[in-house]
Amino acid sequence: MNKNSKTLLRFAGVFGLIGAILGAHMAGSGSYAFRAVHAHILVVGWLTLFGWAVFYKVFQTTETVLTKLHVWSAIIGSVGLTVGMWLYMVKPFNLSEGVTLFIYIGGGVALLVSFLLFFLLTLFIKGEK
């Protein structure tokens, strides 16, 4: 397994575990305060990172600056978006709205960049011989 695939797969596993724990917490408590965070953790964190891990395994891409930027913008974006969303919506700490919005929007922008980089990667995949 190549490095990019393994890194993304491990982060997907962490997001999957956190998402499942949040879901169990919501079911047990009867509170759906975390519903948007839970959904984004599973879709962006678990599903998207897992899909990209499979992409790197199936297509056996070489490690380039573009692939490194893609992998780390995906991870930083997934963490930033979901943590920022949690900080902004749930307000577990008394942080200013500016700080929470910066994390939330910054994570979203990093994730958007990772999707753009992924698209660019698909343009450079070599066809079958």
Image (tube, helix red, strand yellow):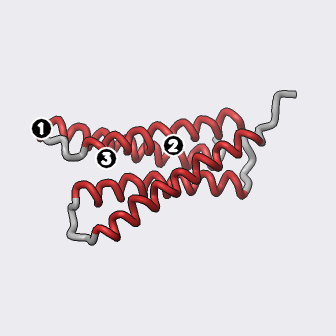
Task: Give the mark nearer the N terminus: 2 vs 3.
Answer: 3
Question: Earlier along the polypeptide chain: callout 1 or callout 2?
Answer: 1
> What amino acid type is highlighted by mark number 3?
Val
Residue at the spot of label 3: 37
Q: CA distance from mark 1 to mark 2?
A: 29 Å
Residue occupying the point 35% across, 59% down: 84
- Figure quadrant of residue 102: bottom left
Q: Nearer the viewer, residue 29 or 1?
A: 29
Q: Are marks 2 and 3 in contact (CB under 8 Å)?
A: no
Give the distance between the C-alpha atoms of the residues marked 1 and 3, in whole angstroms: 16 Å
Q: Which residue is mark 1?
A: 30
User: What x and y, as percent, mark residue 25?
Assistant: 19, 42
Which class describes the residues within 10 Å of circle 2: few (<14), some (14-19), or many (20+)?
many
Q: Secondary structure at mark 1?
A: loop
- For badge 1, the amino acid type reads Gly
Give the residue furthest to the top: 129
Kind of residue at badge 2: Leu
Q: Residue at x 35, y 42 (%)?
A: 17
Q: Residue at x 46, y 37 (%)?
A: 47
Name the quadrant containing residue 72: bottom right
Q: Residue 21's x, y, as percent?
A: 27, 42
Q: CA distance from mark 2 to mark 3?
A: 16 Å
